[in-house]
Each structure stands twice: as C-alpha cells, then as structure tokens.
C-alpha cells in the first residue's frame, strides 16, 4: 500500500441492471442486458434453446433495441412496459409513432402492465404472469427495466449515498 496524492478524485463505477424482485427472476432463460458478456450469454441461450416467443420487460432504449433484434431473428415478441407509453422521456406524440411502428412489426405491446411473476417448467421460464392476471407464454425473457448506480466501492470506502442511491455529492459534484 502507498499514498497517492491527487487534486480531484473522480469516481466512475458505472451501473448495474435492475433485476426486479418478482418470483422466477433467476430462472434459466431470463436475462438482463448491460454489456457484451450479457449479449454473449443471451446468444448462447438462443443457440442452445431455440426460441419462438420472447418477452421483453421494459420499453426504454435497451428494451427497444432488443425487441428489434429479436424481430429480425423471426421471434414473436411481446413488450411489457409499466408506464403508459414506451420511452418514458419522449413526448407522447413521438412515443405513439414508435408504438405504431412496433405494432406494425407484429410486436405485442402491453402498456401500463406490471409483471407479477415468471412461471417455469423444468426450471426454465415458460410464461410471464402480469398483475392483471394475464399470462404470456414465452421461451425467453429479457429484462430491460433500467439501471442503478454501482456503489459497492463507494460504500466500502465509507462514502455517503444520496437520495437516488448514487454517491452523494455537493453543488460542485
């Protein structure tokens, strides 16, 4: 160990995908997508378990990119979003145009929908059950519910976390 002088310390630990705590989230056939190793795991799963139907949870930028790629592979896709529109930060008019394009490409769109649990058979995911009671059959689930700050290093160093869960900063960052 040694001391290293510095003028400014910048922490840039990145983020980790949000894994909602619904039952079945750790089942085989359920993935998050944040980086290339995640994509490699999804592609390996598709190779070993051919997929006819997929459910994407979360209609942000990552979720929509996944939907597009799955549709290109000829997979029937259902997109579930808990908000009343896809791409929450977009204005309503633009979001509606993108939603129409999804429907035109045979994507089943479920807005204002919340996942209750993932059902499985022989340990592998087979359906997504919504709070509404609807069950959507699937061979694959990709969860794109957003990210949260990666704070393990900051916590270990004794730094405070802010209200949003990230490292607490002052008005100067």
Image (spheres, rainbow, N blue to C red):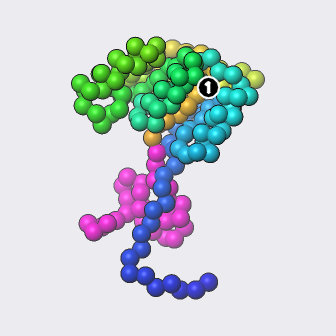
- In front of the other: 62 or 23: 62
**Where residue 83 sits: x, y (%)?**
36, 28
Does the segment drawn in magenta span residue 149? yes
Does the segment drawn in magenta span residue 168? yes
Which residue is outermost to the right? Answer: 122
The answer to whether residue 116 is seen in the rendering is: no
| Residues shaded magenta | 147-173
Q: Residue placed at 51% from the left, 84% from the top?
A: 4
Q: Residue placed at 37% from the left, 19% from the top?
A: 101
- In front of the other: 147 or 61: 61
**Where residue 8 sits: x, y (%)?**
38, 76
Element class at badge 1: strand
**Where residue 91 sits: x, y (%)?**
24, 31
- Circle 1 Cα neighbour tier, 10 Å, few/some/many (<14 / 14–19 / ≥20): many
Relative placement, left or right, of 50 versus 67 is: right
Q: Residue placed at 28% from the left, 33% from the top?
A: 90
Residue corresponding to mark 1: 140
- In front of the other: 93 or 17: 93
- In front of the other: 114 or 7: 7
Q: Quadrant of residue 11?
A: bottom left
Q: Quadrant of the N terminus?
A: bottom right
Q: Quadrant of residue 166?
A: bottom left
Q: Quadrant of the C terminus?
A: bottom left
The answer to whether residue 171 is seen in the rendering is: yes
Relative placement, left or right, of 86 versus 64 is: left
**Where residue 141 sits: x, y (%)?**
58, 28
Q: Is residue 43 above or below residue 52?
A: below
């Amino acid at each position: 160990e040694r001391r290293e002088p510095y003028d400014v310390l910048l922490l840039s630990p990145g983020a980790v995908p949000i894994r909602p705590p619904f039952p079945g989230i750790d089942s085989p056939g359920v993935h998050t997508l944040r980086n290339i190793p995640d994509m490699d795991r999804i592609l390996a799963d598709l190779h070993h378990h051919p997929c006819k139907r997929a459910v994407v949870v979360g209609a942000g930028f990552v979720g929509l990119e996944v939907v597009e790629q799955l549709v290109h592979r000829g997979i029937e896709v259902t997109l579930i979003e808990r908000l009343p529109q896809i791409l929450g930060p977009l204005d309503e008019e633009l979001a509606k145009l993108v939603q129409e394009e999804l429907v035109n490409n045979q994507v089943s769109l479920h807005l204002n929908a919340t996942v209750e649990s993932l059902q499985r058979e022989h340990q592998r995911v087979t359906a997504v059950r919504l709070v509404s009671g609807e069950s959507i059959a699937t061979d694959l689930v990709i969860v794109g519910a957003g990210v949260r700050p990666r704070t393990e290093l900051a916590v270990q160093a004794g730094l405070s976390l802010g209200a949003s869960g990230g490292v607490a900063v002052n008005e100067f960052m």
